[in-house]
Image: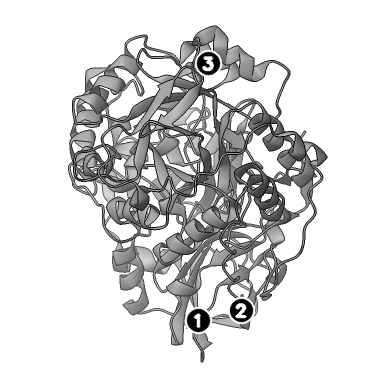
Amino acid sequence: AGSAGMRSTRSFPRTGCSCSHISFFSSRFNWSELTPLGLWGRTLGLQTEHSQFLLEGMPFRIFGGSMHYFRVPREYWEDRMLKMRACGLNTLTTYVPWNLHEKERGKFDFSKNLDLRAFLSLAAKNGLWVILRPGPYICSEWDLGGLPSWLLQDPEMQLRTTYKGFTEAVDAYFDHLMRVVVPLQASTYKKGGPIIAVQVENEYGSYAKDPNYMTYVKMALLNRGIVELLMTSDNKNGLSFGLVEGALATVNFQKLEPGLLKYLDTVQKDQPKMVMEYWTGWFDNWGGPHYVFDADEMVNTVASILKTGASINLYMFHGGTNFGFMNGALEADEYKSDVTSYDYDAVLTEAGDYTSKFFKLRQLFSMVIGQPLPLPPMIESKASYGAILLHQYISLWDVLPALLQPIKSELPVNMENLHLNDSIGQPYGYVLYETVIFGGGHLHTRDHVRDRAQVFVNTMYVGELDYNTVELSIPEGQQGFRQLRLLVENRGRVNYGLALNEQRKGLIGDVFLNKTPLRNFKIYSLEMKPAFMKSLQHVSGWSTVPDYFVGPAFFRGRLWIEQQPQDTFLKLQASGWEKGVVFVNGQNLGRYWKIGPQETLYLPGPWLRRGGNEIVIFEERTAGRIIQSVDIPYLGRTQYVD
């Protein structure tokens, strides 16, 4: 599989390309002089003229690749951009995640790994134009498609429509976002930046609940100073429903069906053709396989697209990682949450290493361009730090009184409506619902658990509840009251489809014991934010891990590094860990789960330091004693995309 990459090597294989028909390209396109720093004093930007793009009046084709700054450590942004150029690409495409930039309503963050201005400026410095996809909805296998969960506090909320509560929030967000991006447009007078096009929303044709919405988003961009070419992006079925006047329609697909590109002519006449998302691989769900897409089939399809004269964007060129709790989910026949890795079987691996797809595409693009390409940057070595002992633990039940103040409520309250975080609720993580019961009996959720609950009587584990398991038998105890506890995990909000308005998490309604709704809850928020994790280190009650222990509990250990830290991968399942989350030096690496497919978590070298590195694991059930640091990722048994 392409996702394994080439570890610890500094040479490049000579990968043959199976596309013998490359020689039939009728005309070459050398864009080497058409770069952001090579075109000062720009005034025209990207335009369309009949069936071709013009950049500053010169014929231009977009050879693009998607990479998301929020999925890649900032220290590696430039490395990935240089690899784009070495592959023959001239344009970088990125989404902008609203739910990271405005985690709390009215508080905006464009710093550190979210420094969008720095990311876009770096693209210009490295000779890449930018197609910006600011949403507000981005899909992207990202929690709620990038929309902030606090929008769902409003019980009447209608996401992705002209509902007043939604547009007011978008307007406030765009007011801040556009101040960052408007000066970085390609044709902005004297401030020419890399942005040559801006996408209006994202695949709205597959949602299409409000005929006025796309015009609203378009005007929200124009009214705040966006002057570059506007585009829309849809799959074939949604294409005609996602149009908006004044924006170029583009199409998304993986298999080039006969007549697919010509279908664009049926919705817009005499315009350049652009594949906004050519899917180079696919994403994975917990419990499924690791999807791969054949490299030869992929490069042959790209060659066929280029032969038509169309422009293309590779989604993804480099996928990166769903760090923390930010993964999205699917809900078609059933709910399926996405794994932590966003490797995507893309052109570069999750850790930024080359795959055969890279070298095949490099050969293809070099033939189209007709000029030598920059040499590919050397691969960074990966480290295997060996076994790491988790020597101490503290039970969740001991953490509660020390660090957490419960919210008291007669009724169960969903995560988003908890009175926390300056009243924006709890967006991610776990929430514990605790109430008093007398005796046992039949517990029924009426499908009100989102998404998975562990059930305890006092500290005794009783079972799990989720979408498929909605009832449990609670054993009778001795006389007197007992605590019934439901530890509910938000496994990730659905990011695509028509159910976005129904993505509230935790307990979203009553849970019944013997047909009587439970009441009088103590509700503990376990979002596991950095301040909580820091406090956890200093709480009393940590003790030596026994030979066998059942969670939920926090475990900690130390990784000692003598030399300059390097990327590595943490492997847990083989050592007996079942399900949970890993933190290294306070950074949330994401979730692991023994059901797979993913078996290693990517740990970027820049997040490590020489000397001691603190590792904390929150394990829901069965803990191991060690984790392994290895130099090869393992993303699971593979299955080819049909």
Q: Residue at x 46, y 53 (%)?
A: 71
How far across and how far down the image is residue 35, in percent?
41, 48
Q: Which residue is mark 1?
A: 565
How far across and how far down the image is residue 255, in percent?
71, 29
Q: Which residue is mark 2?
A: 383
Q: Which one is in front, 308 or 257?
A: 308
Q: Which one is in front, 273 or 143?
A: 273
Dot 3 or dot 1: first in sequence order is 3
Residue 23 tag number: none
Name which quarter of the figure residue 104 lies in: top left
* Up/down of 161 relative to 31, above or below: above
Q: Are marks 3 and 2 in contact (CB under 8 Å)?
A: no
* Up/down of 464 relative to 614, above or below: above
- Quadrant containing the N terminus in the rendered view: bottom right
Q: Which one is in front, 407 or 55?
A: 55
Residue 594 placement, left or right of 342: right
Residue 255 placement, left or right of 590: right
Residue 183 placement, left or right of 636: left
Q: Residue at x 61, y 35 (%)?
A: 278
* Up/down of 581 relative to 561, above or below: above
Dot 1 falls on a residue whose secondary structure is: loop
- Quadrant containing the C terminus in the rendered view: top right
Q: Are marks 1 and 2 in contact (CB under 8 Å)?
A: yes
Dot 3 or dot 2: first in sequence order is 3
Cα distance, mark 3 to mark 2? 46 Å
Q: Residue at x 36, y 57 (%)?
A: 125
Q: Which residue is mark 3?
A: 239
Cα distance, mark 1 to mark 2? 8 Å
Comparing labels 3 and 1, the label whose residue is closer to the camera = 3
Residue 258 placement, left or right of 491: right
